[in-house]
Image (cartoon, rainbow, N blue to C red):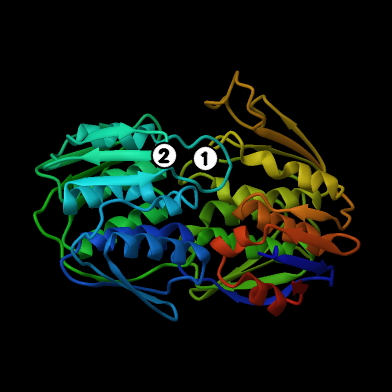
Amino acid sequence: MTEKLWEIEPSGPLRGDVTVRGAKNAVSKHMVAAMLGAEPSTIRNAPDVGEVGITAGMLEHVGMAVERSGGEITVVPRPVADPSVGKAFTGLNRIPILMLGPLLHLAGEAFVPLVGGDPIGRRPVDFHVDALRAFGAEVTIAADGIHARASRLVGTRIDLPYPSVGATETVLLAAVRAQGKTVIRNAATEPEIIELALFLQRMGARISFAPDRRIVVEGVDRLGGAVTRLEGDRIEAFSYLVAGLVTRGEVRVHGCPQDRLVTAITTLARMGARFEITDDWIMASAPDGLRPAAVQTDTHPGFATDWQTPLMVLFTQADGMSVLHETVYENRLAYVPALQSMGAEIEVYDTCLGGPACRYHDTAALHSAVVRGVSKLRGGDVTMPDIRAGFSAVLAAAVAEGPSTLRGVHHIERGYHRPVEQFRALGLALRAV
């Protein structure tokens, strides 16, 4: 198969309007949750991303029916034909691990292949496996995947060592139909977690949010179907706001509510961005240039780790020294060499800079960066290693001197809604080859 490429010619400030759809990080989890219903469920405002097709394939493999039309996805639950998610899905994304709980409820057994996703650092399955064992499942990790068996999952208390989004989702999907009560302590509270919980509640689940990152779930015997409309993708919205700022233009983003971007908006405002915010859209510009900043990523409601990749490119165009401290994934900065090859002045360190010591303190993880701006970026031939790094490469190419060739574009197409159309609408000279 011929490799897909994007050829980008810098074309000045990016200006215009972008409408974001539901989050990539939400739609696939809703599709898995819909397996648990006795009737069909419909998810509206779904993005047209590769992640949806991959997840639909997994659901269909185990026996579910998935109907897609425009921005609408309907999952029709059916008896499980095969409780094994095929090995053909090995390494494509991290959805298989989330299917263990639903398959145990529906079939009493499950096999999922080894998970994949972006190579941004260790995202061990230990939290997921330990949680399922706490529910009473027998779980075995083999070389090719994870085998699980349970006659009935029983509510329990789960103390997560870290507020992991994926592990919180695994516990929610197992707890809603488990016998008795489940309490999740140190749960993730990202907007996508809340959105999933609300969807499950519409299906009939009994979920309560308690102080101090606690979620309480009272198991029920039956869930029905539900209809929901996904909120706009906060990662995509931030990415396009930065696309306008980094090129000295202005992008108006529709479809993502302000409350999902509170920390991001204030961070950009401190750097000199000016905002216009309404109930329908958010627009950012920086007519007086950009100032440097020190930013630390964190779990919600902190600065999201997925926001830091476009922010790093923005740092290269701010006048002065900026610092980035990544505390969520230890290998998130693996994309930096690609930006360095385009002229970005970035140094990475294994020490905690720009914030208090994090869990990667005294490890060899290169998780802090110092960026000197303003850097004159130059076009290059760059391979995108993952979704978010892919977007940063597009931003760097948009502001660089000379043309760029970007490879590995399937990554960005897996996570962003029709990015070629969106960038062209903003005025970027982008040719998909």
Q: Locate residue 267, reporting x and y percent.
A: 62, 50
Q: Quadrant of residue 228?
A: bottom left
User: Between 239 and 340, which is closer to the camera in this rendering?
Assistant: 340
User: Distance between the Cα atoms at labels 2 and 1?
Assistant: 32 Å
User: Residue tagged by mark 1?
Assistant: 298
Q: Quadrant of residue 249?
A: bottom right
Question: Which residue is painted at 20% across and 69% down in the image?
Answer: 225
Question: Which residue is painted at 68% across and 40% down in the image?
Answer: 334
For badge 2, the amino acid type reads: Asp
Helix, strand or loop for disc 1: loop
Q: Locate residue 18, reporting x and y percent.
A: 61, 75
- Residue 373 visible, this orientation: no
Q: Locate residue 403, reporting x and y percent.
A: 87, 64
Whether 396 is drawn above or below 73: the answer is above
Question: Which residue is painted at 80% across and 61% down in the image?
Answer: 405
Query: Which one is closest to the eye, mark 2 or mark 1?
Result: 2
Whether 397 is drawn above or below 114: the answer is below
Helix, strand or loop for disc 2: loop
Mark 2 touching mark 1, by CB under 8 A?
A: no
Quadrant housing the N terminus: bottom right
Left or right, residue 413 beside residue 310: left
Left or right, residue 53 beside residue 107: right
Q: Quadrant of residue 247?
A: bottom right
Question: Which residue is painted at 42% across and 67% down in the image?
Answer: 231
Q: Locate residue 330, reporting x and y percent.
A: 58, 33
Which mark identifies residue 144? 2
For badge 1, the amino acid type reads: Asp
* Mark 2 residue crowding within 10 angstroms, few (<14) / some (14–19) / many (20+): few
Whether 251 is drawn above or below 294: the answer is below
* Mark 1 residue crowding within 10 angstroms, few (<14) / some (14–19) / many (20+): some
Which mark identifies residue 58? none
